Amino acid sequence: MLPDTDELAEVLLDLAVPHEDINALVAQRRTLTADAGAMRLVAECVEALVRDMGEIVEYGDGLQLIARTAEAPAALRRIFPAYVFVAALPHTRAYHRARGVPADVSRRTLTDLGRNMAVHRRRHGTTGVQSPQWLVLHLRGELYQLGRLHFQRARLWSGAARGLAAAGMAAATGTLCLDLHIPDFLGPLTPAACDRSVALAGEFFAKHYPEEEYRSVMCHSWLLDPQLKRYLPADSNIVRFQERFRIAPRDAESADTEPVQFVFGDPELPVAGLPRRTSVERAVGDHLRSGGHWYIGHGWFPLPEEGLRPSNG
């Protein structure tokens, strides 16, 4: 179920796992495979995650993976989800091939394991998987990296449907939509890069999921908090990113740790000492230090019509 020691190192490299983490995963493989209970747990997790492959279930199975990780031997818990990810890869790749997903899209999508582990190391200084529930979306064919952005096959839940309907979207609970996410470690969020990603998404889902009609893209992020416009110039990448969207009402509850996590790498950093090196760092930190709060914003925009269906030619 798991690659042997030599092959495992190569697989991890293909998944963009940081070099300083590969030795630990290879070394602990022996501990894992010598424990029949732990190997059975890997098999059960894989079976649960690939069941109904391709169905839109969002984060439900991811929460199950977190719960099951607690059953792993203590020495393996921080890295256990990485072994589940590797063991599930053949199922995911077979699904991608069956859907005709290009090899480069499949490869770049699955390298999010490495990005996730890089985030864990940046925050904790150790080998580990930061957000196992997030990676379930990749394993099940619910999310793809297309250029600069991630796009997730999703359905509107009731709260999102109400908010987006108030912003002018013809939305009802259960409506198919694409959730847009902004991965780290991929350079600036330029308008040109976003334009390209949106165009790629329109083409990709029309071709590889022709039975699912995606008419809109939505995003739920602190980057859509309108307060950012008070601090950033009109031509900044973040402000121009916001202007793509028709903004719906923001959350009522503040989410101050979100920008601290994504801008500075650790949501627990003391606000008083946050650096002020860039305009975004100054915006996030100065706003919090002045007693303000940040909120998750919500927005949507229509997917270009030419991306709705593949051509018949």
Image: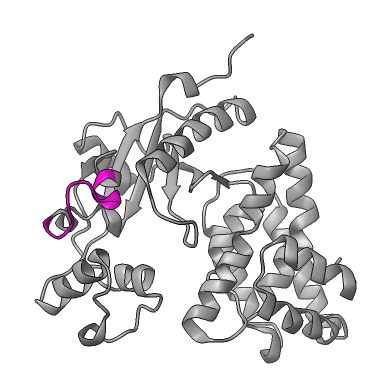
Is residue 45 at all visible to an observer of this figure? no
Instruction: Please report the bounds of the magenta region as a residue range.
Output: 230-240
**Is 76 placed left or right of 257 in the picture?**
right
Using the image as rendered, state which of residue 161 and residue 99 is in the foreground: 99
So how many labels did they put on this image? 0
**Is 83 placed left or right of 267 in the picture?**
right
Q: Quadrant of residue 270?
A: bottom left
Residue 184 x/y as whole percent:
47, 61
Q: Quadrant of residue 76?
A: bottom right
- Which corner quadrant holds the C terminus? top right
**Residue at x-position 70% and y-position 60%:** 48
**Is 8 placed left or right of 180 in the picture?**
right
Q: Quadrant of residue 23?
A: bottom right
Q: Is residue 25 above or below residue 238?
A: below
Is residue 246 at all visible to an observer of this figure? yes
Extreme-bottom residue of the structure: 75
Residue 46 x/y as whole percent:
74, 62
Q: Is residue 43 above or below residue 52?
A: below
**Residue at x-position 80% and y-position 79%:** 26
Residue 6 x/y as whole percent:
89, 72
Q: How is the image coloured?
A: one colour
Extreme-top residue of the structure: 313
Using the image as rendered, state which of residue 299 and residue 286 is in the foreground: 286
Extreme-front residue of the structure: 277
Q: Is residue 225 above or below residue 191?
A: below
Residue 42 x/y as whole percent:
76, 71
- Which corner quadrant holds the N terminus? bottom right
Q: Is residue 232 magenta?
A: yes
**Is 34 placed left or right of 166 in the picture?**
right
**Residue at x-position 24% and y-position 35%:** 165
Q: Is residue 251 magenta?
A: no
